[in-house]
Amino acid sequence: MTIKFSAFTAASTPALADQVVGLQSAANVRYTLTQLATLFGVKKFAGNIGDGTNVVYTVNHALGTKDVKVTVYRNAAPGDDVIADVARPDVNNVTVTFSIAPTTNQFRVLVWA
């Protein structure tokens, strides 16, 4: 897909400014970002990890590529990102390793390509 940014001018797309102004609620912004992700072919997998015992988790994302970005964050407030070791053993899995076993569903892992 080719996008010509020069085509987006006030004269040729007067509704563009109205669309941008219309993005006032967080729900609209999230919906628009989801649309952009779909438009540009972004695929993702998300799931909870942690069982109170293990420190290594294999996450099967089934995205068919090692070219993935992985984010791990705390499920409870404040929902901050956490540091974990991430490896990509094959095109459909990542392993996430913690220094201390996380409690049940303590963290959420997001994998996107």
Image: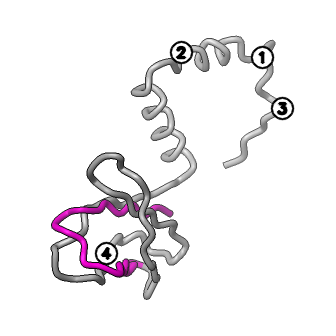
Q: Earlier in the sequence, mark 3 or mark 1?
A: 3
Identify the residue shown where x is 83% and y is 32%.
6
Give the residue pinned by disc 3: 6
Give the residue pinned by disc 4: 60
Display colour scheme: one colour
Give the residue pinned by disc 2: 22
Query: Disc 1 marks which amino acid?
Result: Ser
Mark 2 residue element: loop
Q: In the displayed structure, does residue 28 sit left or right of residue 74?
A: right
Residue 49 quadrant: bottom left
Q: Earlier in the sequence, mark 3 or mark 2?
A: 3
In magenta, the rendered stretch is: 92-113
Q: Do the numbered discs 4 and 3 sit on residues whose CB atoms are within 8 Å? A: no
Mark 3 residue element: helix
Residue 4 quadrant: top right
Q: Do the numbered discs 4 and 1 sit on residues whose CB atoms are within 8 Å? A: no
Residue 50 numbered mark, or none: none
For marks 3 and 2, give the CA distance.
22 Å
Query: Disc 4 marks which amino acid?
Result: Asn
Query: Disc 3 marks which amino acid?
Result: Ser
Identify the residue shown where x is 24% and y is 78%.
101
Mark 4 residue element: strand
In this view, 57 is above or below 26: below
Single out the mark in the foreground, 4 or 3. 4
Single out the mark in the foreground, 1 or 2. 2
For marks 4 and 1, give the CA distance.
45 Å
Between residue 64 and residue 26, name the one nearer to us.
26
Q: Earlier in the sequence, mark 4 or mark 1?
A: 1
Residue 12 numbered mark, or none: 1
